[in-house]
Image (cartoon, grey):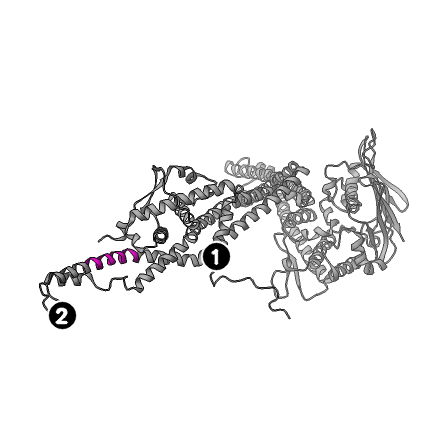
Amino acid sequence: MSDEREAFPLLFRVDAADIEPYGNRDLWPSSGPNRPSNGEKFIIAMSYGFKMNVRMELKKPDPSFQVRGEYFKDDEKALLYSVAVSSEVNLDVVLDGKRVAEIAEAYAHGGLTLLAQKLAEAPRGTLWDDLEAEILELAPVTSDIEEPPTADRGTF
Amino acid sequence: MKASDSGSTRFDSLRLRNYRVYRDAEFVFPSGGSYDLHVVVGHGGCGKTNLMNAMSWCLYGQERYQPSKSEGLPIAFRPLGGALAGVSPTVSAELKASRRDPNSSEEIVDTFKRSQGDSGLSFTHTQIRGGEVVQDDDAERASITINSLIPKEMRWYYFFDGEKIQDFLFGQATSNVEPALSYLSRIRLLQTTMNHLTSVQTDLQKQIAKNNPAMLALVEDKARDSEQLTNLRTRLEGQERERDIAKEERDKYDQLLQSQGGAADLPERQTKLEAQKTALESRIKVAESAYRSALYRVAGHVFAEPAMRQFDALVEEKEGRNELPPPVEPSLIERILNEGTCICGTPLAQDADIREHLNALLRQVKEVSNLGGAVAPIRQYVSLVERLLEREPAELGGLRTSWAELRQDLDSVCVELASVDMELQQIDAGQIRQAQQNRTAQQELYEKYVTEIASTKAEMQLLEKRLADQEKKIAIAQGKEVSLKEDKARLAIVSDAIEIAQRVLSQRTEMVRSYVSDRFGEALQEMMWQKDLYPRAFLDDSYRIHVMHAGGGEALATMAESEKEIAAIAFILALHEVSGYQGPLVVDFPFGRTTGKMTDQIAEVLKSLSQDRQVILLVTDTEYAATEGILQPCVASRHRLVRSNGETIVEAEA
């Protein structure tokens, strides 16, 4: 019987064309101590690719740049599996680590290509402002966020 | 009783030529009414403080308060457009003072005139007694005369700024009061007498002990210690002088810096703002990093959120079909196959079809079980992300706001810094920095001398004690010595004289302190409108001023501004009375710290004081308007200062 650990892929490949975008500081602006790791960038690219429904098979995987699966956190694993399941519309895919990796790689490649394209088109420094707006639009509205009081409330 | 009738000195007139803002001006302060109250009215910068400075300069060659805008400027009047080429006008101030001889009731008029010009400095004094010119002195004699009327050591208790009058009550007052009281006690004179007597005593003791080596050694030790004590006294005087100079210099820089207002703080503000900017930049980096880190995480979660929903749907679907977890435990089927017996105990027939069916069922259950095992942790992860997603957008907003606020703060700091930089470019920042450094240096010097004085005094106390012991030993040895009766008799007289001088010195100091203290208490009671509030006021052994509450606690720090001003005036009057040097009170900006009722109260006190001494008030238009109702009916003279064509004109008003 194989458990989740065995089913989970240990390595995720990256296309040679993505090496530059992974290292591009304009694409990943962060000036402080918490710079995103390659794994985090991979997950964001994959999620974005999934959201935009752009899945590109790797043309030329670069063996010098791989994302190691054992460093993914639980929430990131949730995304990897969900994307694979949703993509195949089949829960059984979770038992096939290799397939989960292939799906994630294809979406990450597609997502990163889109992001790089968006970066090139957007005015400098505005990419993540646009993305943040999209994120906040998509984010579920929670009931415990207080609405600002209206001006006419409580008047005589 | 009028000021001049009581034997106290009053100023009759002041004539100024080319002195600062005054090209040619005359102030006449007539006497004769019930109140000797005089008012000089003028707006800021038209020469009120300089009028007081002129009086002080005329009498002592030193200005009372040097406004910073006049700092470093020549004392000479400068017409509009600057100094006249090649012409250096002679500056002169002539002050006429009068008093009545307490013995003969004869009127004495002293005229002091100080000049400064191309031909140098001059200070002269002319005295007219009973209409006859009886004296015409040179500078040295003129200084002696003014010191006999208002001693230089006490001049600051006659000319002062009402706004700063409270300084007489606090901290730095101690160093002002002690020299003034020492002067009043004539300590220096007594000290000199004692030094002389000690030297005579030593000579006599040597003479008596010349045939007794042991006694001679004692006398020589004492002589050495006496000489050391005299040296220490000289050193102490020097240190006190240096301390006072440092203090004066420090106060001068304080005034200069104060007059610069905000400008004086600019270099310090610039440093602080630069530090703030650096700290903010670093905090912004951290805040940006936290924000971006959250943004990246939320991006992954939000963009893949539909996938997680689909995952949940597929799991629910399978669960609905009862396929997750498997309906049958695989080990149960394995047992049936291995044992060939059903779970109810009935043996299974050796039917190949049944075994094949059970094997297929076991495979299927195992597969489902694997899937269930794999899906379970993923469900937990997905559920975790879903929970995170409930609060992450709000947290992200919060982090963005914090980051934006910090950037806003930085923008404000940068704007302020730019403005400070610009202001610094416009002013002479170097000069301010220099003044601040000089002020610090003078303060350090002042503190250094205060410490040195304390150490010298301690050294002197030790020596004095040793000398007293030596004196006793010598007296015992002398009793045994057979020597000339005459020398012994002389020595006894000198020793008695020293003892008396020492006693007088300590009694006199204490007496003066105690007189001033008592008189201060009485004066405060007389002047205070709420008599019961502060029943006791005194000067302690360390020359510190105390005003006590009815309940016994120290009240000075918590008194109203007007009360503090009254306490300071009471103290000043106490010094005047005890010293016997009765002179005018010249007060610049008397209502500077008070408003409303308090101003009225001060005005009433000053008016009342002018019944037995001369009071000259230098007031702004606003101050006069506020007190006119009280002062005007009693005013003996009123002058108005008006700026015209770059000079101040004096208009005597009816």
Q: Is residue B427 visible?
A: no
Amino acid of disc 2: Cys
Whether the residues at callouts 1 and 2 have beta carbons within 8 Å, the answer is no
Residue drawn at (32%, 49%), measured in percent from left and top?
A100
Residue B17 place in picture, x, y as percent: 84, 39
Residue drawn at (29%, 64%), measured in percent from left and top?
B321
Q: Nearer the viewer, residue B202 or B561?
A: B561
Location of mark 1 (residue) = B394
Please report the bounds of the magenta region as a residue range: B362-376
Residue B131 place in picture, x, y as percent: 91, 45
Q: Quadrant of residue B2?
A: bottom right
Distance from Cα at disc 1 to Cα at disc 2: 59 Å
Near mark 1 (Cα within 10 A), the count class, few <14, some 14-19 or many ≥20, is some
- Which secondary structure lies at badge 2? loop
Location of mark 2 (residue) = B344
Q: Nearer the viewer, residue B330 or B389?
A: B330
